[in-house]
Image: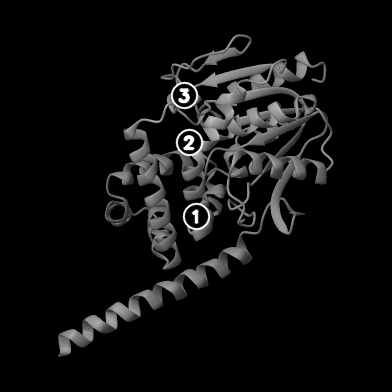
Amino acid sequence: MLVSAIIATLLIGLPVVGLLYQLAGKKRDHKGLPPPGRLIPINGKRFHVLECGRGPSVVLESGIAGTSLSWTLLRDKVAAQARVFSYDRAGLGWSDATDKPRTLANVVDDLHRLLDAVALPQPYILVGHSYGGLIVRQFANIYPDEVAGLVLVDPVECGEWLPLSDFQRRRLARGVLLSRRGALLARFGIVRFALFLLVSGGRRLPRAIARLSAGKGASVTERLTGEVRKLPPEAWPMVRMHWSGQKCFRTMADYLERLPENIATLAETGFPPGVPTILLTAHDACPDVPPGVVHRPSAKSGHWLQLDEPELVIDAISDLLNRSGRG
């Protein structure tokens, strides 16, 4: 009886402790880590926008779960020659979550409304990393007169996902499952606790938690953690705050579920004709480069070129600024 009572107490008490720990952490984050930019209302939802510099407009679009923090290493340098706009998509970073499906049409519409709301001068040079490459390409397809050029930073390759193989289908389904599991763990403070230990220098317990919750997917967590460490240390608490909440995991699940649909949409339209485009790829990438697209492969960078070699992205933006006569 005593053992049963202890087990029952633990089963009830631990989730309650986790909920209280998460609520206290969120309150502390809200007070101590306010958004560095401003919050712009669009259709009843607030979007976090960070702008700096003066001159022609450069728009930075992050990867599938990235935020405006992804561009920390190059934003100020680009701002020396342009007005730089970066933001957090709905459901990520400091931006509000949304009930609208994360289709390319909805994401591009969000961005277009946001650029109008802040009165960013046209035409724009759009810079998209990874999944963000799909977004900026579709933006240029829909609004070609508003775009002066594209910089694609190791973008998602449509050809790699069409047609969708059984392996890729299972891989996406697993990603959705792990994202939803992450949202549940975040609700009870487990993600927050693991990240706290990791930032504090702990390794064994965070890895054990990752393996118990994600299995083989734990290697993805370790790779992402390695990328985050390339950011300035002052950005780490903000990244940790974003990953500690349910919002980012739920948004990630939606993006992964919509990935085949969004890639099929973009494959139908192809590359926007007449829009100067520079393609930057990781050292081990073998992209299918369309005619007219300037390809600049990296000699050493991985997928996150803006963290490994930010100067490559800066040079590409400068070249498009000069080409358009606005540098």
Instruction: Please name the amino acid that badge 2 sits on.
Output: Pro
- Point out the residue furthest to the bottom here: 1
Between residues 163 and 88, which one lies in front from this camera angle? 163
- What residue do we see at 72% from left, 50% from top? 37
Q: Is residue 62 visible?
A: yes
Q: Residue at x 65, y 39 (%)?
A: 105
x, y (%) of residue 56? 81, 28
Task: Say which of marks 2 and 1 sits in front.
Answer: 2
Q: Which residue is mark 3?
A: 301
The location of residue 85, given as percent across then percent down, is 73, 38
Label 2 environment density (alpha carbons within 10 Å; few <14, some 14–19, many ≥20)? some
Q: Amino acid at mark 3?
A: Ser
- Decide which of 188, 25 is in the foreground and name it: 188
Lower position in the chain sequence, tag 2 or tag 3: 2
Q: Amino acid at mark 1?
A: Arg
Disc 1 target residue = 250
Q: Is residue 182 above or below residue 129?
A: below
Per the model, the C-alpha gap separating discs 2 and 1 is: 18 Å
**Residue 283 shown left or right of residue 263 in the figure:** left
Mark 3, secondary structure of its residue: loop
Say which residue appears at 32% left-offset and 34% top-offset. 167
Tell me, yes or no, if residue 311 can be seen here. no
Q: Quadrant of residue 279?
A: top right
| Image coordinates for residue 40, horizontal then vertical, percent | 76, 53
Residue, disc 2: 260
Q: How is the image coloured?
A: one colour
